């Protein structure tokens, strides 16, 4: 960061409202060449609106925005891209069937003197760009053959190919493992050394500490604070984000376990999951972890009937429970709260109320849905788990990620399921929303529910789990009691591959 140079972006008193609700309130911000300026805040703090203004998708209601010293009066995506602002969103907008080089130069292909696409020259240019970024990526490889971090790297290369002066990265490591995350953070630091300004948005505070030159905190649409990277602490940032002191790691109460046992016996599907068995007791929160592809989500899908198993049995007490479809699972008191809430958990173009009743429509008698009854019950959950919404008719796509997750939770909890599987329950949500989810899980355990929590977050596993089962290569390799749960042990089994004795 070089504050002797003019700022790449300078924003004064910027505000934006929707339908009378202020979502960004009098925010000022600046970004200098070579600076990594992190933007943090809870879901609904205003980060997404801020990004969309800078990317040209929204026009601010008031305020002044200067890009490279030029006062911006017209806000359109093409205008902002031509000014050198490139935004890389959490969802990747890439063509997996095309080559790396084709993705980098998509829409601006390298052509010959005759005006035809010159594949050889395009591949050479892509290689030069990737080499300059110190990336060992084959420009002729199909993008779909690359891992998550390399795909993100290709997105960054695409932005640089379009002469980016400012790079906005929105949760770039959301789907990455530990190794992939390190690679992306390393690329961020290298890009900043080129003099490119980077606005970095992440819920993971460890990433913020690693790359930030400065950090700005938003809360309820307002700028709360800006710190130098050397000044920040986790406690200080969290307090600014949530407006109060909070524990950095959730401390849960211990629940006495019931006697009744749930048993999964030899669940398997060829090429999907090897024979898997385990037991748990009522009131127990059983953590599941392992690297991506280890078999955690595959097991959840087999239990829920979303994927048909080749064999295996589920017993609750002495009763054998038959599940061959999600509908059967729901009728038998089993629910799965999926990791991908937008694709498999919600109807984004429908209202909060419709989403709330979607999992238990069969509870209504007769040919019509009692929407009034559903809305009344929804309001109870809005209060119970602190859902921030205007009501049942608000389209769910306009809620923050944390509030969308809470609606998914409310939808399934109202089915009064006995066996609840949470797949990455706090992925992509803020600290305050995480606490709400954790409290809800403890309440369910207190009521004697069987709870599985699939998570890649080791502090979360340590705080919430009574036991942790570790999976690798589509089978269980370890079953660890709470006292032995540690990052070292989890990594030892999930990466080192020791078998559980």
Image (cartoon, rainbow, N blue to C red):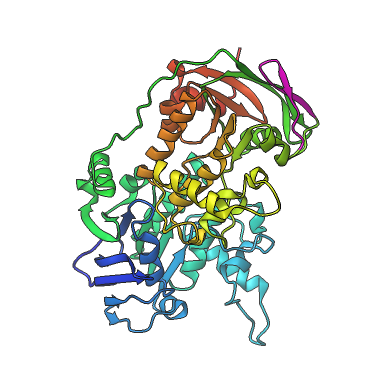
- Name which quarter of the figure residue 270 lies in: top right
- Look at the image and say whether residue 318 sits in the magenta stretch: yes
Q: Which residue of the protein is positioned furthest toward the bottom in this rendering?
A: 114
Dominant SS of magenta comes to strand
For the residue pair 147 and 248, the one nearer the viewer reads as 248
**Can you say which quadrant of the picture contains the N terminus?**
bottom left
Q: Nearer the viewer, residue 422 or 137?
A: 422
Q: Is residue 165 above or below residue 338?
A: below
The quadrant holding residue 189 is bottom left
Asked if residue 151 can be seen in this view, the reply is: yes
Q: Residue at x 26, y 60 (%)?
A: 222
Taking depth in this image into account, of 112 and 75 the one nearest to the observer is 75
Up-down relation of residue 457 to residue 3 (above or below): above
Image point (74%, 39%), residue name: 325
Q: Is residue 239 left or right of residue 288?
A: left
Could you say which quadrant of the image residue 232 lies in? top left
Q: Residue at x 68, y 82 (%)?
A: 116
Residue 8 painted magenta? no
Horizontal and vertical percent position of residue 98:
67, 64
Relative height, residue 467 to residue 455 (above, below): above
Please give the range of residues in magenta.
311-324
Q: Is residue 50 above or below residue 225?
A: below
Q: Is residue 67 visible?
A: no
Query: Is 392 placed left or right of 261 in the picture?
Result: left
Give how far across and how far down residue 499 sits, in percent.
Answer: 61, 18
Between 393 and 174, the one nearer to me in the picture: 393
């Amino acid at each position: 960061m070089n504050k002797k140079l003019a700022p790449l972006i300078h924003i004064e008193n910027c505000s934006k409202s929707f339908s009378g609700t202020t979502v960004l309130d009098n925010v000022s911000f600046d970004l200098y060449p070579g600076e990594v300026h992190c933007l943090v805040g809870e879901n609904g703090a205003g980060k997404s609106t801020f990004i969309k203004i800078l990317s040209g998708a929204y026009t601010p209601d008031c305020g002044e925005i200067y890009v490279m010293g030029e006062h911006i009066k017209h806000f359109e995506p093409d205008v902002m891209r031509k000014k050198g602002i490139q935004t890389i969103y959490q969802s990747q907008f890439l063509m997996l069937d095309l080559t790396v080089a084709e993705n980098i130069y998509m829409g601006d292909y390298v052509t010959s003197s005759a005006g035809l696409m010159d594949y050889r020259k395009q591949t050479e240019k892509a290689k030069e760009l990737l080499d300059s970024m110190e990336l060992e990526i084959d420009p002729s490889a199909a993008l779909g053959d690359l891992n998550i971090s390399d795909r993100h790297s290709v997105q960054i290369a695409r932005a640089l190919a379009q002469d980016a002066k400012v790079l906005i990265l929105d949760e770039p490591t959301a789907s990455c493992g530990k190794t992939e995350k390190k690679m992306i953070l390393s690329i961020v630091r290298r890009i900043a050394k080129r003099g490119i300004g980077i606005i970095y948005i992440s819920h993971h505070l460890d990433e913020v500490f690693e790359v930030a030159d400065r950090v700005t905190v938003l809360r309820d649409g307002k700028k709360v604070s800006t710190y130098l990277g050397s000044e920040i602490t986790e406690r200080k940032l969290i307090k600014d984000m949530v407006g109060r002191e909070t524990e950095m790691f959730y401390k849960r109460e211990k629940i006495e376990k019931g006697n009744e046992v749930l048993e999964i016996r030899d669940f398997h599907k060829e090429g999907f999951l090897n024979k898997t068995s385990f037991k748990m007791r009522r009131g127990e929160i059983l953590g599941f972890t392992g690297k991506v592809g280890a078999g955690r989500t595959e097991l959840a899908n087999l239990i829920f009937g979303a994927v048909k198993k080749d064999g295996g049995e589920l017993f609750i007490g002495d009763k054998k429970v038959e599940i061959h479809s999600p509908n059967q699972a729901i009728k038998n008191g089993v629910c799965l709260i999926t990791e991908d809430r937008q694709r498999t958990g919600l109807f984004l173009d429908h209202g909060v109320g419709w989403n709330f009743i979607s999992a238990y429509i069969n509870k209504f008698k007769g040919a019509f849905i009692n929407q009034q009854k559903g809305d009344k019950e929804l309001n109870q959950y809005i209060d119970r788990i602190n859902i921030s919404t205007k009501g049942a008719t608000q389209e769910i796509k306009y809620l923050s990620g944390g509030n969308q997750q809470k609606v998914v939770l409310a939808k399934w909890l109202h089915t009064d399921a006995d066996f609840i599987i949470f797949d990455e329950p706090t992925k992509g949500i803020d600290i305050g929303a995480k606490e709400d989810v954790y409290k809800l899980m403890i309440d369910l355990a207190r009521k004697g529910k069987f709870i599985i929590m699939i998570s890649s977050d080791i502090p979360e596993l340590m705080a919430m789990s009574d036991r942790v089962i570790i999976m690798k290569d589509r089978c269980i390799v370890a079953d660890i009691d709470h006292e032995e749960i540690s990052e070292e042990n989890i990594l030892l089994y999930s990466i080192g591959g020791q078998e559980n004795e």
